[in-house]
Amino acid sequence: MKEKIKKVVEEAIKNHFSFIPDFNVEIAKEAKFGDFATNAAMVLAKREKKAPKTIANVLIEEIKKRDDLFEKIEVAGPGFINLFLKKEVFQEYLKEIEINKNFARNDYYSGKKIMVEFVSANPTGPLHVGHGRGAVLGDVLSNILAASGAKVYREYYINDAGTQMTLLGESVFARYMELFKKNTAEFDKRYYQGEYIIELAQKIKDKYGSSFLEEDKKRLSFFTSFAKKEIMDGIKKDLNDFGVSFDNFFSEKSLYDKGKVQQVLLKLKEKGFIYEKDGAIWFASSQFGDDKDRVLKRSDGEYTYFATDIAYHEDKVKRDFDILIDIWGADHHGYVSRLEAALNCLGAKGKLKVLLLQLVNLIKGGKPLSMSTRAGQFTTLREVVDEVGKDAARFIFLTRRHDSPLDFDLDLAKKKSMDNPVYYVQYAHARISSINREAEKRKISLPEVNDIDVKLLKEDEEIKIIRQLSIYPDLILSVSKMMEPHRLTFYMQELSSMFHKYYNSYRVIQDDKPLSIARLFFVNQIRHVLADCLGLLGVSAPKEM
RNA sequence: GCGCCUGUAGCUCAAUUGGAUAGAGCAACGGACUUCUAAUCCGUAGGUUGUAGGUUCGAGUCCUACCAGGCGCGCCA
């Protein structure tokens, strides 16, 4: 609806001025300011060197000439144009929601291929809550971009090469030896400490017995790959149970196996941005906006993580993606500029968009729980999901902007009351479903759309709710532009609140049958929007609670 | 020391991306179920938006400096 009004204003401007400025149409804060308001006149005022109110009056005349959407148009305050829509515009809008199943979709990213790379946790242990936040952000963002016409590809990058993997193998091996009482020394502090390492060792013992006690060159690589596969399977299961799926799991190791790392270094060298110093190989990233140059190959001959990451991102570019979205923990933010530098050098400037995730603090009994993967005292994603449920976990992860820290209150997430936003929203959906059941009981069913008398929906609350419904498509558009899915949860809380209020003041099913039908139709459009939005969030829309 | 993020009601957070009188929930108190689900709703209170300047018709939002907190600054990942 906002977009529609924006076009109307734009037409009016076109007719009188040679220039179309960047202006806003927004929902009015108060009833006396109408339904929507635009700042177009104020923005134009500067360029035209005229008073905003003069310009506003010109625009109003233009709008009135060509459109009959409006009941009243006024100039107010410093030069806002307040637009009062005719009630029937809103009333008719309900039919659009009902008929056009794609009413909340847009084509902003149409024709664009977008990769969203997220989670990408090292296969050295189970996912913790921080990964869960990234998983939901990536998953929902992907849904929204797809709703805006993009062809979205979800990928998980597996860091299955390098020292961490060796350490993982060694950790399991040490536990294995312990099971045979062969290792009297204390368990190395560098090793992964978690309980799951012992379980993996036990698994190997159960399956292969003592066959690894003898010295064997391939022994360690077996432990590494066994642990990696087991852990990765666990991660995939956790993600699956959390409603998060991927199109592809991309292996870092495969980059080495296919020689991609060497290739990309060669490419950078040909461009002349590689040099040797102190026995190491450096990339001149400072020439592309980074603070300083970075090492790609250490003096001991090992490639750095940065080197493989360049190779990986080059691979993404080659796969023809228009936009590359990476979701990282905020502790990696120092890494953004060097990767951007690399992509600039490779001719993919501006394609990368990194979203940084701040920490999740788990709160229980009013106190924070601390966590650290290495120390083995973390709360896993699975534990949280088992405790509060998938719906609550997903929803709460999206109640904050990604770059602000999130306090996740486990007690609150389980509470079945109005302070729990998940239930509040789901309850609205369930209540409408319940109204439907009551209607069915009384043999009231909805006729063809055109046989519904929407003019009966004339209460202020009804119009206000329809107005809120009408900006839902605009919300989807703006969320996909800004890449801020958390706005959806706020929108739904607001819409749910409006519905609950309405429910308490008006009866839907009653003696007046035409009115009952109109209102039944009305609340079901609320339900449609709630269900659509919950669907994008991957949260269920229950019919009863 | 340098860089990034954050700072809004007692608490947790919003604020349509520069718009009109900065809004919700929690916590406190009072009220509403013989009714389509009370997991709901209604009413009462709370503010120098960390501080000081600046930009303009207009600043919580943009710029500068400072204060406080978090994170990062390796030939680690």
Image: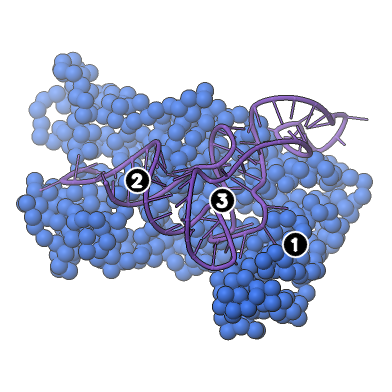
The x and y percentages for residue A182 are 15, 17
* Residue A275 seen in this snapshot: yes
Visual hue assigned to chain A: blue
Q: Residue at x 61, y 35 (%)?
A: A420
The x and y percentages for residue A212 are 16, 26
- Please state which of the two labelled residues, at mark 3 or mark 2, is closer to the viewer: 3
Secondary structure found at label 3: helix
Of pointers 1 and 3, the one earlier in the residue sequence:
1
Task: Judge from the rendering whether residue A281 lies leftward or rightward of residue A361; answer left or right.
Answer: left
Callout 2–callout 1 Cβ contact below 8 Å:
no
Give the chain letter for purple.
B
The x and y percentages for residue A446 are 81, 54
* Residue A308 seen in this snapshot: no
Residue in front for this viewpoint, A382 or A2: A2
Quarter holding the C terminus of chain A is: top right
A375 is higher (above) or lower (below) than A14: above
> CA–CA distance between discs 2 and 1?
48 Å
- The amino acid marked with disc number 3 is Arg
Residue in front for this viewpoint, B24 or A318: B24
Quarter holding the N terminus of chain A is: bottom right
- Please state which of the two labelled residues, at mark 2 or mark 1, is closer to the viewer: 1
Residue A487 is labelled as 3
Residue lying farthest to the right in this orientation: A511
> CA–CA distance between discs 1 and 3?
24 Å
A129 is higher (above) or lower (below) than A345: above
Name the residue beneath numbered marker 1.
A34
- The amino acid marked with disc number 2 is Ser
Residue in front for this viewpoint, A200 or A305: A305
